[in-house]
Amino acid sequence: MTGMANAAAMTQMVNSDYQQAQTVGTQMMADNQKQQMRRWQIMQDTQTKIFEIQQDVTVNKAKTQDKMFNKWDQYIRS
């Protein structure tokens, strides 16, 4: 009878360890997915900021060129 009780206890311990390992694995996958989503969000934010900076630079270049053209035009006309 003792052998059966020991076998049952061992089986229960193995099953408990297996369930704990599955829980840890599931938590690790969830954490990994959360980290991937955060990296994706950071990448999107970075790309958006880069695009905004490029737009500002393009507009500023055009304004500067317009100013220089107007000054040159004014110089020629005077």
Image (spheres, helix red, strand yellow):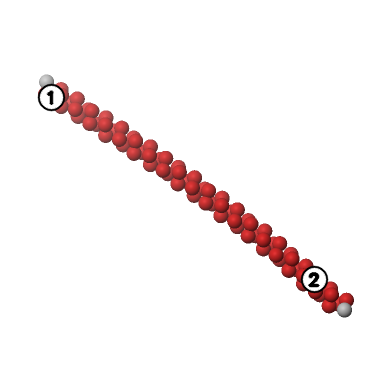
Which residue is located at x 45 percent, y 46 percent? 35
Identify the disc placed on residue 65.
none
Which residue is located at x 49 percent, y 45 percent? 37
Q: Is residue 60 above or below residue 77?
A: above
Q: Which of the two labelled residues, at mark 2 and mark 1, occupies the earlier sequence position?
A: 1
Label 2 environment density (alpha carbons within 10 Å; few <14, some 14–19, many ≥20): few
- Residue 24 at x, y percent in the picture: 34, 39
Residue type at numbered disc 1:
Gly
Identify the image quadrant of residue 3.
top left
What residue is disc 2 on?
A: 69
Q: State the SS at label 2.
A: helix
Label 1 environment density (alpha carbons within 10 Å; few <14, some 14–19, many ≥20): few
Q: Is residue 8 above or below residue 52?
A: above
Taking the image as shown, residue 2 lies to the left or right of residue 55, namely left
Of 11 and 47, the residue lying toward us: 47
Q: Quadrant of the C terminus?
A: bottom right
Q: Is residue 7 above or below residue 30?
A: above
Taking the image as shown, residue 4 lies to the left or right of residue 70, namely left
Which residue is located at x 77 percent, y 72 percent? 68
Residue type at numbered disc 2:
Phe
Identify the disc placed on residue 3.
1
Taking the image as shown, residue 74 lies to the left or right of residue 14, namely right
